[in-house]
Amino acid sequence: MLLPNDDQHPVWLARVTEDGMLEYVAPYELQAYLNRWAGRMMDVAMWPHSTRRSQRQNRWWFGIFIPALANDLGWDRHDRMKLHYALVSLCFGTTFDERLGIDVPNVRSSGLNTREFSTLMEWGVRYAAETHHCYILMPDDLLAKQKDTTDET
């Protein structure tokens, strides 16, 4: 799956087969991307796929980011999950489900690994700032700010 890390540095999900070959989850999208770089040398990095987002990520997203953006947008507390689902859909896209007759998210946040959830977090911060002028700090920035505030007292 192509993750929206940025247009120049996507992350692709692949399985290593028994004979040591890579089997990509989205081979056609990968081929289209690779065609843009035909003839160039590329750096390739690999790491094992993680299957779960971290508790820290989850606490920041649902405990800080979603409430802060919802508050800034004037959403009621009980509508926060609607905001969450809308953001996941905006970040990772939707697909039209003919049976339901509506667009459904391409991914579920509960199925994201730590790297994919980090993509959602970083995208969310940019989206909130660029689209709604709502500035929310990432977890490491929050910790640094707390440390600076503690050091001043």
Image (tube, helix red, strand yellow):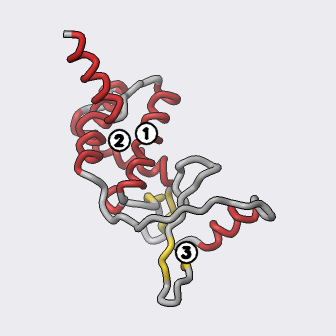
Of the numbered discs 2 and 3, the one sitting upstream in the chain is: 3
> Mark 3 highlights which residue?
24
Measured Cα–Cα span from mark 3 to mark 1: 27 Å
Quarter where residue 110 is shown: bottom left
**Compared to 96, does 65 lie above or below?**
above
The residue positioned 49% from the left and 85% from the top of the image is 17
Do callouts 1 and 2 mark residues in contact (Cβ within 8 Å)?
no
Measured Cα–Cα span from mark 1 to mark 2: 11 Å
**Compared to 101, does 114 lie above or below?**
above
The residue positioned 41% from the left and 54% from the top of the image is 115
Q: Nearer the viewer, residue 150 or 88?
A: 150
Q: Give left or right: position of 13 versus 147.
A: right
The residue positioned 41% from the left and 50% from the top of the image is 88
Identify the secondary structure beneath mark 2: helix
Tag 2: amino acid: Leu
The residue positioned 45% from the left and 64% from the top of the image is 47
> Mark 1 highlights which residue?
124
Identify the secondary structure beneath mark 1: helix
Quarter where residue 27 is shown: bottom right
Most extreme residue toward the top, as rendered?
153
Between marks 2 and 3 in the image, the one whose residue lies nearer the viewer: 3
